[in-house]
Image (tube, helix red, strand yellow):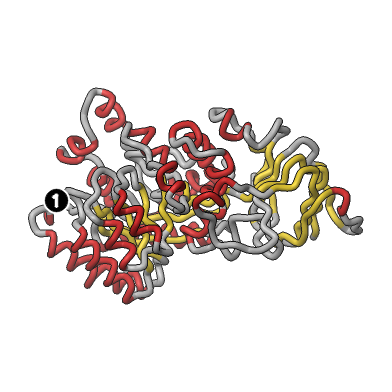
Amino acid sequence: MQKLFINIKELLQIRTNPIDKVSGDAMAILPKIDNAFLLIKDDIIEDFGTMANCPKLENTEVIDATGKVILPTWVDSHTHIVYAGNRIQEFVDRINGLSYEEIANRGGGILNSAKKLNETSEDEIYEQSKLRLEEVMLQGTGAVEIKSGYGLTIDGELKMLRVIKRLKENYSLPIKATFLGAHAFPIEYKENHAAYIDVIINEMLPKIAAENLADYIDAFLETGYFSVDETVKIMEAGRKYGLIPKIHVNQFTAIEGIKACVEQGALSVDHLEIVTDEDIEVLKNSNTMPVALPSCSYFISIPYTPARKMIKAGLPLALATDFNPGTTPSGNMNFVVATACIKMKMTPEEAINAATINGAYAMGISKTHGSITKGKKANIIVTKPLTSYYQLPYEFGNNLIEKVMIDGEFIS
């Protein structure tokens, strides 16, 4: 069945010639057509253009989009959607003055989530997680990466990755699974890092590979968590099983982790609240996508990724939510785009590029998603009537989405 959208006020992120990503000054360019049409055939973008060239078709559902903006769905390339319970008490603890590190040192943080997850059945985790996934889809997310990392045991990590696999099987949007066994050191390995890394490499990875449960591998490369050398070992082990690195790095400190990730061919380096001139030089000569997580900075009051400095240096940048129970209990990409504009001083054009085409690159799906391009998947956002697309970040607290289409079908 064909669907023809007509009288579209603004059709955003149109790319006649397919591209994988945009960088530097090009991030400020968001190609669009005013007074446009968009033709969808089954689950594919068939055609688009100005209304002056709109085809007259039979056996086609015509949808009048007068006053509305259409753009590709958001691509959220960094989430922890699969988890058990919540960490509401830690939210209050931070308000009362405790730091992220202090909460972690008293058994909170990642270890708190790991305890809850290991006490919860796979079916219950799936039921909790699918509700979160459905919520972010309704908020415009049409592709999502989901990490493990709250198991920290063989059974716990496998449980998480099996839940992600079930979500993949039951929902039509692209879902990529990332193995993050190296999220934190369990208490019993706090003084014996080598032993836990041995468990990750020689026990977890073979079982994950045997069940084909992951696309990528990750580690929390940070002072007090996984060192550069430890992370390199994990990246090298993952690559032997075909798992490309996507690494947490530079959230609190810069310890030459970005250099190690680039050398290991990481698809993305994520967080980057702290970025040095040396880090920028390393990223300039790489195929690694920097990913900023502004709602994490907002929620735990840490610095924002220095987007202006990075874009001025010619780098690309993607945006993602970091949706997780401790430091970002929200998967709303609309808020991420708005926060990038308000707090990181990204233009709306840069932020939308970062949340669509560059996000698709950071998920490894830019050939099929992230732009309005003939032959790409029909994953689109249809807004309510707007003055212009600038209204999306401007009205940061309002829901301006009318409908979301995934694989050519509206979701509800």
Q: Quadrant of the N terminus?
A: bottom right
Can you say whether 107 is above or below 200 in the image?
Answer: above
In this view, the residue in front, 205 or 366, is 366
Q: Secondary structure at mark 1?
A: helix
Answer yes or no: is residue 300 visible: yes
* Apparent side of residue 89 relative to residue 380 in the rendered image (left or right): left
Q: Residue at x 52, y 48 (%)?
A: 354
Closest to the observer, 235 or 404 = 235
Kind of residue at badge 1: Ile
Q: Is residue 321 left or right of residue 325?
A: right
| Closer-to-camera residue (33/191) | 33
On the question of residue 81 being in view, the answer is no
User: Camera-side residue: 138 or 293?
Assistant: 293
- The residue shown at (54%, 55%) is 22
Percent position (x, y) of residue 170?
54, 58
Dot 1: few (<14), some (14–19), or many (≥20) neighbours within 10 Å? few
Quarter residue 289 falls in = bottom left
Above or below: residue 390 compared with residue 136? above
**Residue under the image location 85 percent in, 48 percent down:** 51
Position of the C terminus by quadrant: top right
241 relative to 391 in the view: left or right: left
Which residue carries the number 1 mark?
A: 187
Query: Up-down: is 238 above or below 120?
Result: below
